[in-house]
Amino acid sequence: MKGVNVGVAPVTYGTGDRAPRGEYGRARSDYTCAQDFAQYTEADHATYRRLYERQLQQLPGLACDEFISAVHKLGAPEQIPRFDDISERLMKATGWQIVGVPGLIPEEAFFSLLAEQRFPVTDWIRKPEEFDYVVEPDIFHDLFGHVPLLFNPVFADYMQAYGAGGMKASRLDACELLARLYWYTVEFGLIHTPQGLRAYGAGILSSAGELRYSVTSPEPKRVGFDLQRLMRSRYRIDTFQASYFVIDSFQQLFDATAPDFTAVYREVRESILAEGEIDAGQVLPGERLYSTV
Ligand code: HBI
Ligand code: FE
């Protein structure tokens, strides 16, 4: 899901003023659009299948169990799945559905879709020459990275709470702080398990290289989840992460989003004024880090 600011998703996806890749003219006023299944060529289906199979074989020992146990619910990778088929299964499991979007959408639209338990899935797929890296999130990142954990009731509830919080953040001009929470959990989160660290973030799970790197490399700093420390932390969109935040459970994530964030934003802003923001890869004095062994 690394990407550039396509003019509709400010801040979170970094700078750059590339034209949006998707066809936004076909989107409704809430930025959703029907999945244009006819657009997919045989090469597109083959790209999806190859991405899926490559990522599936490296999940054991790196992806969290909740993800591994749900990824098959996307359906067989012979073809790009139909969103309606996945939504039918997802609705029964957690009340969520997936909806098509042409690509990145404005934060307010994104937050309100999450609050309605509708996850936006980009409906185009990267070209073969972008197999290993695509600038904007495509259907593989959204489907493979994000959708399996929406079958987990606690994580799904966290996503809805995040969306509801986002609606309030817009009014409090706190989207950038809240976007860091999304980045360091939903996109690049790690979870501590009795078997060791595992990935649950979509940006990691859909990345051929970052999945192994995030769980096993000695390079990045792995910090225990702390909401205020996280909201002070900058991130990079164009490299593997230099910092990861580690949770103990999805319940911990959900509980962290339960309180009203107004006071949290105020305290975070005060600590940023007093001590500044924290760079990706930076470790605070006395901070306990997770090791990979
Ligand atoms: N739009 N389609 C889409 N998918 C995202 O993940 C997404 C977005 N717009 C904004 C956004 N994410 C981030 O700014 C979140 O932090 C809100
Ligand atoms: Fe994403």
Image (cartoon, rainbow, N blue to C red):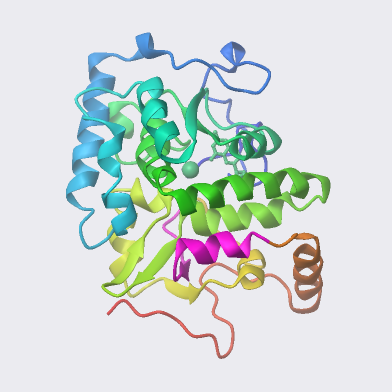
- Depth order, front residue of 279/258: 258
Residue 134 appears in the picture as rendered:
no
* Furthest residue toward front: 92
**Numbered label tally:** 0
Q: Judge from the rendering whether residue 266 lies leftward or rightward of residue 231; answer left or right.
A: right
Q: Position of residue 197 (x, y in %)?
A: 33, 70
Which residue is outermost to the bottom? 286
Query: How far from the left and from the top, in percent, is residue 284?
Result: 59, 83
**Whether residue 5 can be seen here:** yes
Image height check: is 116 above or below 273?
above
Residue at the (82%, 45%) spot, across then down: 171
Residue 122 horizontal/vertical position (percent): 47, 28
Residue at image position (27%, 29%) is: 48
- Dividing the picture into quarters, in which one does residue 84 lie? top left
Q: Would residue 194 be found to the left or right of residue 276 on screen?
A: left
Vertical side of 243 occupied by 103: above or below = above
Q: Residue furthest top?
A: 38
Q: Tell me if residue 281 comes above or below residue 85 in the rendering.
A: below
Residue 62 appears in which quarter of the rendering?
bottom left
Give the residue drawn at x 27%, y 80%: 293
Q: Is residue 222 above or below residue 97?
A: below
Q: Which residues are magenta?
A: 239-258
Task: Confirm whether the magenta stretch covers residue 244.
Answer: yes
Was residue 240 drawn as part of the magenta stretch in this picture? yes
Residue nearest the observer in this picture, 17 or 205: 205
Whole-percent x and y of residue 248?
A: 44, 71
